[in-house]
Structure formats: C-alpha cells, structure tokens
Image (spheres, grey):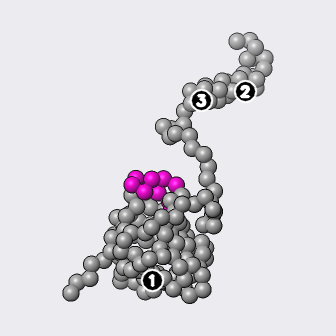
C-alpha cells in the first residue's frame, strides 16, 4: 500500500486500466452482436432491387439496405421513375424518409400536398394514408426507415 501513497496517480491509472481490460476481456456489448458498419448510395452496383407490392404500378423497386423486412427496424431505398404516381396506401409502421434523388409531391390524408426536394426529411405517422407523385425530371429515390416490419396496404375505395 505504501507504493500507492508514494505514487497516487499511478495507482489511479492502474485501477482504470484494470477496469478497461476487464470490460474488454468480458466482451460486454450490451447484449448486441457485433456488426460491420455500412455505407451505401442509391447508385451502388451491389444493391439488389426487388419488386414493390403488387398494387403499385410497374416500375417501382425496393432495395433492402439493412435489417430484415419481416422484422422491426429495416432500412430501404424505394425507387420510382419520373412522373410515377404512388397510389394511396398506408403502413403499420411510422416512416422516416430522406429523398436522395428527384422531387416528390407527397399528400397525407387531411393535409395539403408537400414538395420534397433532394435532401428533404419527412416523417409519416403509422397507419396514415398517403400518396405521392415523382416529378417530371428525374427518378425519385427515397431512403425509408421503418420501425416495424415492412408492409404497405392499398386504400380500398368505397363505392
């Protein structure tokens, strides 16, 4: 103990290093599996673009970026050609979106149409019906983060 009285700063340093080494060796990561980081653009050649739900007109595609579409917390790119009309639909999950390409006119039920320009952020509440139209110049690509599993349901028009 006289060693720590003579060199108190070394004693504190030794205690901190011992704690850090213990944490590293015990592999504590708050119960989460180690993952690799990920950086993608909507133009990456490795992206696998698949079809949209059947009620969407031809030309719509989706690429999963991270996660499993059947589970919570999935990130996707959603792409449609210029002048494409996205029919009125809703999702079980809230959506957090950023427009990466094009211009997108979005209308949520009970709200005025809003224009998303490249870099715009949008939040869509869960189960709130909405529709959209891609502008005439470029394809529209949206990054969308879903909190719940990925789904989309068309609005059934009442006759």
- Residue occupying image coordinates x 57% and y 44%: 35
Secondary structure beneath dot 3 equals: helix
Secondary structure beneath dot 1 equals: strand
- Magenta region: 66-76
Is residue 107 a member of the stretch shown in magenta?
no
- Residue occupying image coordinates x 35% and y 83%: 110
Most frequent secondary structure within the magenta stretch: loop
Kindly give the residue lying farthest to the left in the view shown.
159
Instruction: Bin the neighbour count of mark 2 within 10 Å (Cα to Cα): few under 14, some 14-19, many 20 and up.
Output: few
Secondary structure beneath dot 2 equals: helix
Instruction: Bin the neighbour count of mark 3 within 10 Å (Cα to Cα): few under 14, some 14-19, many 20 and up.
Output: few
Q: Is residue 99 above or below residue 34?
A: below
Q: Is residue 63 left or right of residue 157?
A: right
Counting from the top left corner in percent of width and height, residue 120 is at 57, 75
Counting from the top left corner in percent of width and height, residue 105 is at 49, 83
Query: What is the total number of numbered labels drawn onto the structure image?
Result: 3
Q: Is residue 32 left or right of residue 156?
A: right
Which label sits in the foreground, 1 or 2? 1
**Residue beneath disc 1:** 85
Q: Is residue 34 above or below residue 53?
A: above
For residue 6, which quarter of the picture? top right
């Amino acid at each position: 103990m006289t060693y720590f009285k003579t060199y108190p700063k070394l004693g504190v340093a030794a205690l901190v290093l011992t704690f850090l080494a213990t944490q590293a060796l015990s592999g504590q990561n708050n119960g989460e599996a180690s993952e690799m980081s990920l950086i993608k653009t909507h133009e990456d050649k490795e992206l696998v673009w698949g079809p949209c739900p059947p009620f969407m007109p031809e030309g719509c595609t989706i690429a999963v970026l991270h996660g499993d579409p059947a589970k919570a917390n999935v990130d996707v790119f959603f792409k449609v050609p210029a002048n494409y009309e996205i029919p009125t639909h809703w999702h079980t999950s809230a959506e957090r979106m950023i427009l990466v390409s094009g211009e997108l006119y979005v209308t949520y039920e009970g709200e005025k149409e809003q224009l998303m320009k490249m870099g715009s952020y949008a939040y869509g509440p869960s189960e709130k019906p909405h529709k959209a139209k891609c502008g005439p110049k470029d394809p529209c690509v949206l990054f969308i983060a879903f909190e719940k599993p990925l789904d989309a349901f068309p609005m059934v028009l009442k006759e």
